[in-house]
Image (cartoon, rainbow, N blue to C red):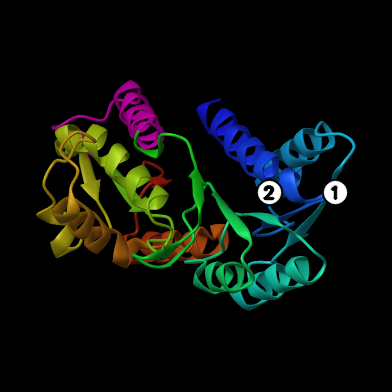
Amino acid sequence: MKRIIGLLFALLLVVSLAACGSNTIKIGVVLPDASEERWANQDGEFFIKELDALGKGYEYEILFSDGDEAKEVTNVDSLIARGAEVIIITSQGSGAGAVQAAKDAGVTLIAHDRMAKKDANNTADYYTTFNSWNVGKAQGGHLVEKATANGCSATNKCDLALFAGRVADWPNATYFFGGAMEMIQPHLNMFNILNVNETFSSLALYTEATFNDAAKTALQAAMGPIDTDWNAGTATIKAAALVVQSLVTNQLRTFMF
């Protein structure tokens, strides 16, 4: 709910300012992939409902990038060419090309869910998201709860494979992973981590309150070898390889943050 309220506030602020110099405000929305349930039928439907509610004096267009950063930039360029004064984007990667295109055209860019940035000094004008750390904690806590309910313990270890989202999706993927690990790490003795790596093994316990640049570096280093690019197919392939290599039983649990 905070994410939605924040987005609406940013959008209303921008279009209110823009309305001072134009009779019709044109708004563009660029989402990552129409084939994904979330973007097509959740966030996409949300944007349609809320932008329709703006009423007379506003026009909008929603485009999808099909998981392609080059197409994402083309979408932004197309919206700008058609007169968009405000563009809302959930970037496929860093969003660097979209940020540059918007800044070159003097268009206000609102990053939704994932921060869009070219570098530290060139980012989206606004950024709206939810508390990704708490989402990760909910995921990690649920995993530990289910493992405990299924009899996993220090003397009856269960095999566990951990996967991460796209490391480049800063900050949300890192926060998902950090929040999840805050809940999982105190209970690691009940698991055999199948895809453990040296960086992951030495990972310190971080909380949202103690998160800093060092924590970001450490968490992202641990995420690197288990990055799935948010792709279910990639996660499946990696999990299948672990099953073959380890000849694990049906105790295998996999989880992606």
Magenta span has 140? yes
Q: Is residue 119 left or right of residue 41?
A: left
Check residue 24 in the rendering and tell me which mark sits there, or answer none: 1
Say which amino acid is labelled 2.
Trp
Based on the displayed image, in which of its 4 quarters is residue 131 positioned?
top left
Q: Quadrant of the N terminus?
A: top right
Q: Is residue 62 above or below residue 70?
A: above
Q: Is residue 133 visible?
A: yes
Front one among 113 and 233: 113
Front one among 137 and 207: 207
Magenta span has 96? no
Check residue 39 in the rendering and tell me which mark sits there, or answer none: 2
- Which residue occupies 52% across, 46% down? 113
Q: Is residue 110 above or below residue 241?
A: above
Tell which circle, 2 or 1, labels the residue nearer the N-terminal end.
Answer: 1
Based on the displayed image, in which of its 4 quarters is residue 16 positioned?
top right
Query: Element at badge 1?
Result: loop
Q: Characterize the magenta stretch by its predominant secondary structure.
A: helix
Which residues are drawn in magenta? 134-157
